[in-house]
Image: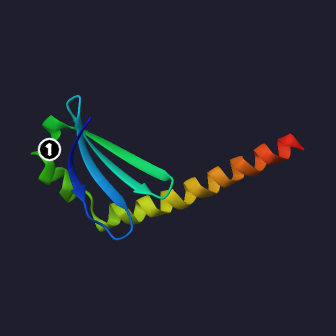
Amino acid sequence: MRLVKDIPHERYKIQLFQYNGKYIAKIELGQFEQTYKIGETDVYGVEDVEKMITPQLLSNALRRFVEMREDWGKAFNEKNNDEE
């Protein structure tokens, strides 16, 4: 997997990769990450993929990150309850 671009952002670590005929947009926040894949033939290059990372997409990603953290916290608590 080849890193093609780091996209600066105040909240997230956003990176674009190229791998196996696809572009991969990776958005990280803390210990969680979300990835989005799109075929190289479906866009006109890295700039096109970058345009897809809109404020609305990032807002939705934040909502999912919160849900991921809640799910992970519940799983952790359930694990601890099973050990008692």
Other-residue count near label 1 (Cα within 10 Å), few / some / many at <14 / 14–19 / ≥20: few
Identify the residue shown where x is 24% and y is 43%.
17
The front one of 18 and 22 is 18
Name the quarter where the C terminus is drawn: top right
Secondary structure under tag 1 reads loop
**Of all residues shown, which one is farthest toward the top?**
20
Residue type at numbered disc 1: Val
Task: Pinpoint residue 50: horizontal percent, then vertical percent.
Answer: 20, 55
Name the quarter where the N terminus is drawn: top left
The answer to whether residue 81 is above or below residue 41 is: below
The answer to whether residue 75 is above or below residue 59 is: above
The front one of 33 and 2 is 2
The picture quadrant where one finds residue 13 is bottom left
Task: Pinpoint residue 11: horizontal percent, then vertical percent.
Answer: 39, 68
Q: What kind of colouring is applied to the model shown?
A: rainbow
The answer to whether residue 38 is above or below residue 70 is: above
Task: Pinpoint residue 79: horizontal percent, then vertical percent.
Answer: 77, 43
Task: Pinpoint residue 48: horizontal percent, then vertical percent.
Answer: 14, 52
**Of all residues shown, which one is farthest toward the right?**
84
Residue 68 is left or right of residue 10, and the answer is right
**Of all residues shown, which one is farthest toward the left?**
44
The answer to whether residue 41 is above or below residue 55 is: above
The picture quadrant where one finds residue 67 is bottom right
Identify the residue shown where x is 77% and y is 47%.
78
Identify the residue shown where x is 27% and y is 58%.
53
Total marks shown come to 1
Which residue is the site of mark 1?
43
Residue 80 is left or right of residue 47, and the answer is right
Identify the residue shown where x is 49% and y is 62%.
63
**Of all residues shown, which one is farthest toward the bottom?**
10
